[in-house]
Image (tube, rainbow, N blue to C red):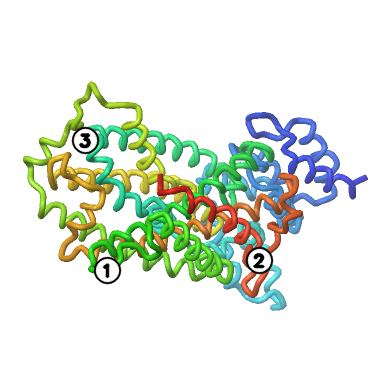
Amino acid sequence: APDDVEPLAGSLVARRSMSISGRVSRPLWQIVREAYLPTRGGGASALLDFYEGGDNSPVSLSPRRWRQQLASAAAVPHLTLDAIARWRGVSADGWMRMLSEAKGAAEADEPSDHPRAASNKSARGTSHHLAPRLSTAFELDSRRLSTFDAYMTACETMWGVIIFLKFGLLVSRGGVVLCLLVLCTCAGVQLLNCLAVSAVASNGLHDGTYSLLVANLGPIWGATASLLYYLGMSALATVEICGAVEALDVLLQQQVGPQYMTGSAYLDTGAIGTASLVLLANLRGYNSGAVHTIGQVVLLAFFGTLVATVSGALLHGSWRNLIGNLSPLQGWAHVSYEDVSLLFTFIYPCFAGIFQPVNKAGLLRTPFSSVPRASIGAVLTSAAVFAMILLSIGSTAPLDRIDEEDFLLYTWPNKYVGLVGTIVVGVGSCVSCLDVAPTILQTVAADNIVPGLQALGVHRLSGTNSEPQAATAFTLALAIPFAWLRGIQ
């Protein structure tokens, strides 16, 4: 019966009854074509013809968005394939811009109750009828972010406390050349990841990382990869806040008086880190809008700290030191696995932000071009910034005299600028991670693919601003134990 076909088609699409290439299986096409579309009008049939003949498959979109488009097109029964075919061959971003412009032109027309409205709309052609409905399905009105917004979001995640606190240790252990080789390797791997993410991110519209992974990998692998990403972001939140506490301890050690807040570095990291996580998680659970304001402040603090620390290192450095520090202190023949492992341990996580543009895909004006440009641009920019920091540290002193906190203590015009700036960067990066992680968990739980998550209530939105407060509390409980693992390593 026709009434049974829509839920059947939706269920099959939701369960990804398709070939590995991502196309709907032919039996499903037959069901949709022969039973469902005749009940929906010519507009839906023409839209499906358009998709079937082009490079994009409707199932590259989420089932909800696909059904929205079919329903929108069905509201225009006189729509023909000729009317919509003129959009074939236009890029996805160009098509969305055309829809938006057509919608604006349609809304500027005379009201529908005007005596000449019906004849005027008919004369203008079909595109003005279709554009408002499809632009609503694509939620174009809510897409306000630019490529630069996505780019800075990715950079904000990559630029954390590790580069200020640990790069001095890395240079002293491996020398400048080995650090740069590891940096290039990590950047190369992440560029390949960016190309892969960009390829699948441009395959339809997605609301975020979880939506993208499920659409391309299926529900099981998509949910699994999303939970791994969630776990990584939860742990990174602890790394950032513990880095801020470590910078606080270095600041105290430059003063006359106690060198630690609680008597030891371990208790400082555990106790102050835990208290800070609780405070920041409550802030995020109350209103995620505050996170974006904090992010802008953190970016200013990062740039200020970066300029001050690099300037101080260069003022204390020399070409002679840099040339002498190119090779490892122990010699190339004695570089151990532990040395190389330490470099990868701290450098690779510095690039953990390539999914951030995907998380903003639902808010980007041109997601198909913004996601690749933002993610690849962030990796290249971060690699250049990290290389500049490693070179400046390598010029400050001979390897056997470089300590991990020297990069902060050499800050121009005063060491306190670097220390306070690092604390601010650590707090802000922690808030950013606490913003992303609960959203991923809440989205995974809402689909009820992973057993037991809904029983914990992490799929619910609550509070005045409809935030994932239960997911935030769960993330907090997961992140706190990491603060007691004796150091960032």
Query: Label 3, on which residue?
Result: 175
Q: How far apart are marks 1 and 2 (CA)?
A: 79 Å
| Most distant residue in the top direction | 333
Marks 3 and 2, the one that precedes in the sequence: 2
Left or right of 236? Residue 172 is left
In this view of the protein, can residue 335 be seen by the observer?
yes
Q: Name the residue under label 2.
A: 121
- Looking at the image, residue 271 lies above or below residue 62: below
Q: Residues within 10 Å of mark 1 (few under 14, many from 20)?
A: few
Secondary structure of the residue carrying tag 3 is helix
Q: Is residue 37 left or right of residue 375?
A: right
N-term-proximal mark, 1 vs 2: 2
> Measured from the top left, where is residue 85 in percent x and y?
61, 45
Residue picked out by circle 1: 257
Residue 221 position by quadrant: top right
202 or 83: nearer the viewer? 202
Distance Cα–Cα, label 3 vs label 2: 71 Å
Nearer the observer, 73 or 247: 247
**Which residue type carries mark 1?**
Gly
Residue at horizontal 21%, vertical 33%? 177
Q: Inspect the image, locate mark 2, and give the three-letter code of the amino acid beneath it.
A: Lys
- Find residue 155 and name its label: none
Q: Is residue 344 left or right of residue 8?
A: left
Q: In this view, does 111 lie above or below 280?
A: below
Q: Which residue is more in the foreground, 403 or 425?
A: 403
Is 114 placed above or below 133 here? below
Q: Is there any visible trace of residue 131 in the rendered image?
A: no
Q: Which amino acid does label 3 sit on?
A: Gly
- Identify the secondary structure beneath mark 2: helix
Dot in front, 3 or 1: 1
Q: Residue at x 40, y 64 (%)?
A: 262
| Marks 3 and 1, the one that precedes in the sequence | 3
